[in-house]
Image: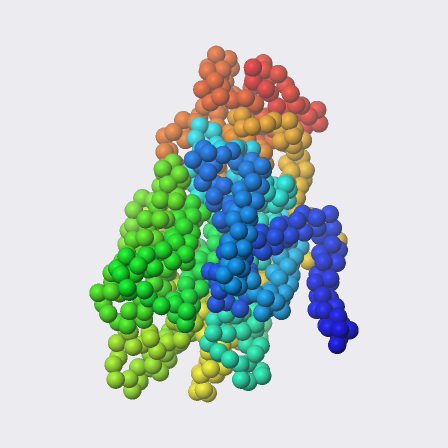
Amino acid sequence: MKHENTRKIIIKLIPAAILVVLSAFLLRRDVWTFWTWWLLAAVMGVTAMPLTGRLFRNFDDKGWMFSKVLAVAVTGFITWFLTAVKIVRFNSATCISITVLCGAGCLFLFYRQHRKGVECLPVDHLDLVYREEILFFAFFLLWTYLAGFHPAAYGTEKFMDYGFMEAMMRSEELPAVDLWYSQGTINYYYGGQYFAVFLTKLSGCRVALTYNLMRTFVAALAFSLPFSLIYQMVKDRLGLFRIEWKRSLPAVTGAVAGISVSIAGNMHYVVYGQILPLIQKLTGEETTGYWFPDATRYIGYNPDVDDKTIHEFPCYSFVLGDLHAHVVNVMLVLLFLGILYAWIRTVHSQDFALKKNSRREFWTQMLLMPHILLVSVLLGMFQWTNYWDFVIYFVVAGGVILFTNIVIFEGKIKDILAVTAAQAAEMLAVSTLVILPFTLQFETMVQGVALAKNHSLPHQLLILWGLPGALTLLFTGILLWEKLRGAKKKTPYHFLASLKLPDMFALIMGLCAIGLVLIPELVYVRDIYENGNARANTMFKLTYQAYIMFGMTMAYVIFRFLAVFRRKWLKVAGGAGLFLLVWTWGYFGNSVNSWFGNVFDPSRYQGLNATLFLETDFPEDAAGIRWLKKNVEGSPVVLEANGDSYTEYERVSAMTGLPTVLGWYVHEWLWRNDVADLNAKAADVETIYTSGDEEQVRELLEEYDVSYIFVGSCEKSKYGENLNNEMLKSLGGVVFEDEWSDTYIVKVW
C-alpha cells in the first residue's frame, strides 16, 4: 500500500515537473524572474489563506486561487494608502515590511481559528488545489512565452503604461510626478500600473521584465479565477454526485468559463474571419484576410460612419500587450465577483442565522459582514484603478444584495428596502472614505452624460452580443416558466426563493451584462473624444466588463442546458451554444499568429525585456536613454521634444520615467482639459530648442526646472535647421554625446 501511494504521488507530480522543465527551456534566462513571480504569488496566497479561507469557507478550494489576488490587493493597497497620506515612503523596504506584517497578521488569525477548530485550508480537496495550481502555472507560462515574441513597450498605449511604471519606480511619494507634465502629478487612474510596480519592488526585479510579466500574470488569473468560481457554482448546482460522468462537469465547465474569459474572441471572428471567407472561397471570390483588431473596431467602421466605437475584450488586450487600467483590474473585478458569490453562499448556509434578538445585534450582523466590507473597499480601489468599474460593480453588487435580501427577508418589502439601502449606503461610504487620498488630488475628466445621438446597427449588436444575449435570455425565460408555472403565488420572492443559488448568481451576471451592452445605445459619458467618437469610451469600458460576465454566464448556462434540463430542445440549444462558443476560441490562434508570428519556433523567442526595441527602433537615441536611466537618480526634469499621442515622441521620458515639460498632447488634454496651457508649454519647448535669445531660454529652463536637455532623432526631425545646437550646448555641460549619431545630453547649469 505504501509503495502504491508513493507511485500515485510520483504520477501526480509528473505534470508539475514537465511544466518546470518546459518553462526553463522556453523562457531561458527569463525563467528566473518568471519563477520568482510565480513563487511570490504562491507564498502570498498561502499566507493569506486564513483570511481567504474564512471568506470562501463554502468553496471546495477555500478560495485558493482568489487568495493570490486578495493578498496582492490587501498588501498593495495598504502600502499605497500609507504612502499617499505620507506616513511611509514608497520603496522596496516599505513594500516588504508591510507584506511581512500582513502575513504575520494572517498567521495569528490562523492560530486563533485553529484553536477554535475552524478549518481555513482546503485539506479535503488538495487534488483540486493541485490541479488549479497546475493550470495557473500552465497559463502563466503560455502567456509569458508568447509575450517574449513581441516584448517591446512601444506602440498603442505602451509608452504611457511603461512610463507610469518607471516614474513610480523612481518616486518614493505617490502620486508620482507626471512624466509628461513635469509641473504636476499623475492625474489618471494609475492603480493598475501601481500594483505592477508594487510587485516589482517587492520581488526585486526590473521593470523592463515585470512590465510584461504583470500582463501575463493577469492573463493567467483571467483563466484561473473564472475556473474556480464556475467550478464551485456547478458543484453547488449538482449537489452530491450520484452519476459517475457528472463528477467531471464542474472542472470541465470551469475550464470552459476560464477559456471563454481569457482567450476567446467574439462572434465577429466567426462571421468575418471564418464564415464569410469560406463563402467567398466557395463562390470563387477573392478571399479577404482577417486582422484580429477588427473584432474590437466594428461598430462605426463597417460600414464607415461618424460613430467610431471600441468594444475590446481580455484576449485582445493580453495579445496586444498594453498594461492599461482596465487590464490590470481584470483580476480585481474577478475577485469582487468571487467574494459576492461567497457572500451569497455564506448567508444561505446552514450555520448562518439572522440575529434578531436586538436591533443593534441585527444591524451589526447585516453591516459588518467581512464580505460586504471587503467589496466596499474594492469598490473604493476601483475609483483609483479604473473608475468605470466602480460604477459598474456598485450596480452589480446592489443587484446581488437586493436579490439575496428578498430571499432572506421572505419578501417583506420594508425589511428588504431598509437593509438593502443601508448596505448600499455602507458600500458607498466605505468606498469613498478609503480612496480619499486619491480623489482629493484627482481632477475628474468626466464632462457629464448625454443622450446617444448615434446607435449601433441591429445586425452589429447581434453579431457581437447575440450569442451570450440569447443564452442569457433563454435561460431567464426557462427559469421563469419553470419556477412560476403552476405556482400559487407568482411574486419576485417566490421566484427567487425557488432558485438555486448558482442559478440566481448566473442570472444576475447575465442580466447585468445585457444592461451594460444596452446603456451605450441610450446614453454616453462626455469627454474630449465627443466629435466622432462620442460613444467610444463608454461602450469600451462597459462592454469590456459585460464580456467578462458573459464568458462565465455562457459556460454555466450551457452546462445547465446540457446536464440538468431534460427537454431535448434545450439540450440542442446548449449544444449549439457550446459549438459557437468554442468556435470563438479560434480567435486566440488567429491573433497570436498575427501579432507574435511563428510561436512554434522557440528560436524566435526574443525575451521579456520591454526596452530592447530601442536599439532597433531608436538606434540614434538608445545609448543616451540608457545613460540617463543608469546615471540619473530621482525625478529631475529632462527636456525632450513633445509630440502627438501614439507616436514615437516621448521615448526618453517613457523609457526612463524622468518627467519632461510636455508629453503626448491628446493624453494630457484628456487628463487636464486645459488646451491653452498645453499650447503654451508646447510653444515654450520649441523656444528652448530653437531660440537664439539665451536670456529667454534660461528663464524658461528655470521656470520648468529643467535639469537635462536631450537632443536626438525626434528633436532633429521636429525642429530641423531651426535646432540651435550651439546655444543648447552653451547652457551647461555635455554629459553624453554619441559621435556616430550626434545625439547629446546637456546638463543645465
Q: Nearer the viewer, residue 79 or 545?
A: 79
Nearer to the camera, 706 or 441: 441
Residue farthest toward the front in the current orientation of the protein = 115
Q: Is residue 491 left or right of residue 599?
A: left
Q: Is residue 407 left or right of residue 386?
A: left
Which residue does the image show at 78% across and 73% down from the upper left?
3
Residue 200, located in which quarter of the rendered image? top right
Q: Residue at x 54, y 74 (%)?
A: 250
Residue 44 position (above or below residue 174): below
Residue closer to the observer: 361 or 239 = 361
Q: Position of residue 151 (x, y in %)?
A: 63, 47
At 25% from the left and 81% from the top, the residue drawn is 489
As rendered, which of 241 and 542 lies closer to the eye?
Answer: 241
Q: Give residue 705's position: percent from left, percent from top.
A: 49, 21
Q: Tell me: 423 left or right of 317.
A: left
Q: Position of residue 428 (x, y in %)?
A: 32, 51
Residue 148, how many percent across, how many down? 66, 51
Question: In the displayed structure, does residue 457 sit left or right of residue 55?
Answer: left
Q: Residue at x 53, y 56 (%)?
A: 110
Looking at the image, is 503 positioned above or below residue 460? Answer: below
Q: Quadrant of the N terminus?
A: bottom right
Image position of 125 with respect to 648: above or below: below
Count of labels shown?
0
